[in-house]
Amino acid sequence: MEYSNETEEKILKAAREIFIRDGRDGARMEEIARHAGLNKALLHYYFRSKEKLYRMVFQKEFQQVVSDLFQSLEPDLIFRDFLLSFINNYINRLQQHPHIVGFLLWEIRRGGEDFSVTIKNILLQNDGFLPEGIIKKINHAIQKKEIRALDSRHLFMNLIAMCIYTFITEPLLSIIFPDVEVNSEKFLEIRKNEIFKLIWNGIQP
Amino acid sequence: MEYSNETEEKILKAAREIFIRDGRDGARMEEIARHAGLNKALLHYYFRSKEKLYRMVFQKEFQQVVSDLFQSLEPDLIFRDFLLSFINNYINRLQQHPHIVGFLLWEIRRGGEDFSVTIKNILLQNDGFLPEGIIKKINHAIQKKEIRALDSRHLFMNLIAMCIYTFITEPLLSIIFPDVEVNSEKFLEIRKNEIFKLIWNGIQP
DNA sequence: AAAAAGTTAAACTATTCGGTTAAAATATAA
DNA sequence: TTATATTTTAACCGAATAGTTTAACTTTTT
């Protein structure tokens, strides 16, 4: 094994950046190599092909996002606090990697059989907790009359939709609202609060 | 002019399909030609380059979506009915072209200077009504105490976010919720209602 | 020191793909 | 009919690019 792991990391890191920026088809192996401060031959030495390298990157990133989402769950809170902390944690995590959401969504959208399998595996791995965990939490709150009766799947979707929205549409939003920096700390703090208030009021019995 | 317009349409239609499916870089001129039942030379005869053809497609599609959004506005309604009709109209229109949202978002994300300009122009063209129109409508409703005080930009974003969500994430959702057809008539009818109820309850004074 | 693993550089292959060209065929307009 | 516009075919060019190979070089391990 020797001193190889470090190089593998270097390649993956560079590949990640370039793939996220240019997409699967737009990315160039030489550019990745240059970015990693290595040469092209090494890329093929470690990962056999562009395809395999790409899959590795995608898998890792998706894994990370799911894991982040999972860690945003604090299951032992009452629903109101659970909601607050989820919005807060999730947006904070996305803020640290604003570009990956769009990247992942593109790939998910065009994903063939292979990617379905990859995604299924990752979801199963964080077994049943996600999004099952959130759905159950919602249903539980409904039963306890903490919130009104509603379709928990849609509340789940709406929650996620609002959290990811600015990260997907940032370039468009910066044209529509030229006076605000949409993914800035300041704006997102307001946004968290607005999302929470909308949902919380929206689900009162 | 003669009988050329028809061919131009054929090319644009095929290009649209392929670009939406494979993206700008993934798409191939020959595939587009084959799809149109024509040959590659014709594509360059009508549109000088792949780039120009692509821009034409993107511009047309974006134009269409903005125009759809615009036509989803029925300004003379009270806010509750406005909201109802907007959600209904907007989702209905997206349902007819489920794939373009992801396509446009990807392009917006990686869009350079040129696309910024294109987008700005289209937005200015439907001048000030959108999203200004929605924002103003919201602010007006706040003033009239029809709804509670809130940040209208965020309500706008949340509204759009929830409407587009299933169209962006469909392949993922169909894995998470294998038992439902997320963009089916039936599911979306429920979804419209859930979105409306969440927002409407969420914005009561 | 010797062996093994890791790394580089550069040349090379093969393929894909955007774009061009030229000549012929077909359709339309005058 | 004649001129013009459109369409096809097929070959071709040139650039970009994924991937390979080889030989030399460096670092680590034993």
Image: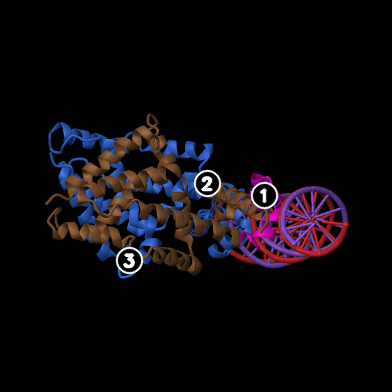
Chain colours: A blue, B brown, C purple, D red
Question: Which label sits on residue A177?
Answer: 3
Residue on which the image places disc 1: B33
10 Å crowding of disc 3: few (<14), some (14-19), many (20+):
some
State whether discs 1 and 3 lie on one chain: no
Quarter of the image with the C terminus of chain A in it? top left
Nearest to the eye among marks 2 and 3: give it.
Answer: 3
Q: Nearer the viewer, mark 1 or mark 3?
A: 1
Q: Label 1 vs label 3: CA separation? A: 39 Å
Q: Residue at left 43%, top 36%?
A: A120
Helix, strand or loop: magenta stretch: helix
Label 2 vs 3, first from the N-terminus = 2
Label 3 marks a residue whose chain is A
| Residue appearing at x 53%, y 39% in the figure | A112
Q: Are marks 2 and 1 on the same chain?
A: no
Q: Is residue B36 left or right of residue B86?
A: right
Q: How many marks?
A: 3
B99 up-or-down from A16: above or below: above
* Residue type beneath disc 1: Ala
Is any atom of residue B86 visible in this view?
yes
Specify few, some or many for label 2: CA neighbours under 10 Å numbering under 14, 14-19, or 20 or more: some
Point out residue A77 in the picture as x, y percentages from the top left corner: 16, 42
Between the residue at mark 2 and the residue at mark 1, the CA separation in whole angstroms equals 30 Å
> In this view of the protein, can residue A129 be seen by the observer?
no
Q: Which residue does the image show at 16% across and 37% down from the upper left?
A: A148
> Residue B67: horizontal and vertical position, in percent?
41, 55
User: Label 2 is placed on what type of residue?
Assistant: Arg
- Mark 1 touching mark 3, by CB under 8 A? no
Range shown magenta: B27-51
Please give the chain letter of the residue carrying mark 1.
B
Q: Is residue A145 above or below residue B168?
A: above
Q: What residue is shown with label 2? A: A55
Mark sitting on residue A61: none
